[in-house]
Amino acid sequence: MIEIIICLLAGIFLGTISGLIPGIHSNTMAGLLLSVQTGFLALFGETAMAVSLVAALIVHTFLDIVPGTFFGIPDADTALSVLPAHRLCLEGHGEEAVRLSALGSAWGSVFSLFVFTAFILLLPSVQSYIDWWVGIILIIVAGVLIVFSESPEWSFGIFIISGILGIFAFEYSWLASGISGSSSVLMPLLTGLFGISVLMVSSEGVMPEQISGSVNTGRKEIIKCSIAGTLAGSAVGWLPGLSNASANAVLASAIRIDREGRGFIIATSAANTANAFISIAAFYAILRMRNGVMVAFSHLQSLPPITLVLSAGFCAAIAGYILTLFFSCSGNFFAGMNVRKLSIFIIIFMVFLTLLLTGPFGILILILAIMIGYVPYLVNIRRIPCMGAVMLPVILWSFEII
C-alpha cells in the first residue's frame, strides 16, 4: 500500500508538470516512465506503476487548461476550448475560466463512472457495427459545422485544406523526430491552427488584472454542459481513430463558442477528463489503446484490478481539481505585461519547442498550419473549420481510403 501511495503522488506530480508546460502531453510522461520501466518495476511493482500512469493521465486533463487560458497555447486536447478561455483572460476573467474548466472536469469524472459501467458491459458485443459508423458520424458533424457557419463556402474550403494538411502530417508523422525521439504531429498542427495564428493578431495593451471570485454560471448550466461533454468525450474515448479534439468539434456543433463560451469551456473540459476514463474502459474491455498511457499498460505482464485503477483515477481527479483551483490565480503574475510582447515571446517559445520535440518536419507543419489558421481571421469567420485537420483524416481512415 505504501508503494501505491508513493506512486500515486508521483503520478499526480508528473501530470501536474505535463499539464502546466505547453507542448508536453501525458503521453510524454508515459514514455518517460516506460524508459525507466525496469528500475521502476523493481522498486514498486507493476500495480504501483499502473497507478502512477493513470494518476498522471487524469491530473493532466485538469491542468492543461491553465497555459491555454493565460497564454493562448493550445494542448492537443484543448484546442477549441482555448479560444473562449483566453478571450476571458484578456477581459480579466481568466481565473473564472480555469475554475469553470475545473468544475467541468470534476463533473466529467463523476458522470463518466456511469458511462464507464454501461460501455464496458454493453458495447464490446456490437463493436464491429460501432466502428463502421465513425466516419458517418463525423461527416454529419462536419456538415453541421459548415452549413451553419458564417460563410459555408469559406468554411468548406478551410475544412478541406486543413484536412489535406492533417493527412499529410499524419502520413509522414514518422519524420516528426526531435531530441526526445518521435513525437506527435498534433502539437505543431494544432499550435499553428489554434495557437500562433491567434497570437499573431493579438490586441495591443496590457494583460489586465484578473478578477478574483466565484464563477458566474448557474449550477443547472454547469451540470447540463458537463453531461454533454461527458457523452461526447466518452464517445471519442471508445471509438477508434478519434481524439478529444474530435469531441471538441462535436460540441462546437451544439454549443456556440462565441455566445456560450463559458458553457463550452465546461463541456470540453468534461469531455477531456471523461475521454481519459473511458480510454481505460476501452483497454480493459477490448484491448484498444487510445493514448500513450494505455500503450504503457500493454507492456505490463498482468493488469491490475480495474477497481484499483478507477480508485486511483478518482483520487487523482480530486487532486487535479484542487491543484487547478490553486493555479487559477496564477494569471495575476502577468498582469500589467504588454500583450503584444507577451504574445511574441510565446510564439518564439512555441517555435523553439516545436523544433526541439518534432524537428524540421514539425516546423514545416507549424508554418503551414499557421498560414491556414490565419485565413479565418482574414475572412472573419470562426476557426472551427480548421478541425478538418483531425476530422478529415479520421473520416477517410474509417472508410479505409487511407
Image (tube, rainbow, N blue to C red):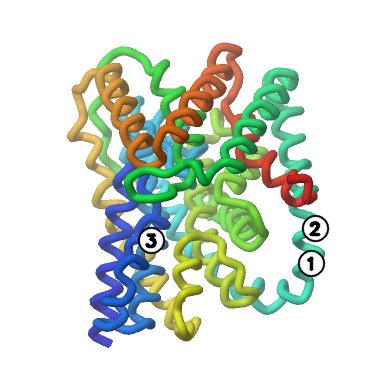
**Does residue 155 appear left or right of residue 28 in this picture?**
right
Residue 107: mark in rendering: none
Residue depicted at 35% across the width and 48% down the height: 24
Q: Position of residue 54 (x, y in %)?
A: 41, 69
Q: Residues within 10 Å of mark 1 (few under 14, many from 20)?
A: few
Res 237 quadrant in image: bottom right
The answer to whether marks 2 and 1 mark residues whose Cβ atoms lie closer than 8 Å is yes
Residue depicted at 77% across the width and 62% down the height: 130
Q: Position of residue 389 (x, y in %)?
A: 61, 36
Q: Nearer the viewer, mark 2 or mark 3?
A: 3
Residue 128: mark in rendering: 1
Work out whether residue 357 or residue 126 is closer to the camera in this orientation and state it: 357
Residue that badge 2 annotates:
132
Is 179 drawn above or below residue 201 in the view shown?
Answer: below
Q: Nearer the viewer, mark 1 or mark 3?
A: 3
Q: Disc 2 marks which amino acid? A: Trp
Q: Report how far apart the C-alphas of labels 1 and 3 lie in the structure.
A: 30 Å
Mark 2 vs 3, N-terminal side: 3
Which secondary structure lies at badge 1?
A: helix
Which secondary structure lies at badge 3?
A: helix
**Does residue 334 appear left or right of residue 365 in this picture?**
left
Is 317 drawn above or below residue 185 in the view shown?
Answer: below
Mark 1 vs 3, N-terminal side: 3
Q: Report how far apart the C-alphas of labels 2 and 1 lie in the structure.
A: 7 Å
Q: Is residue 130 visible?
A: yes
Which secondary structure lies at badge 2?
A: helix
Residue 31: mark in rendering: 3
Q: How many marks?
A: 3
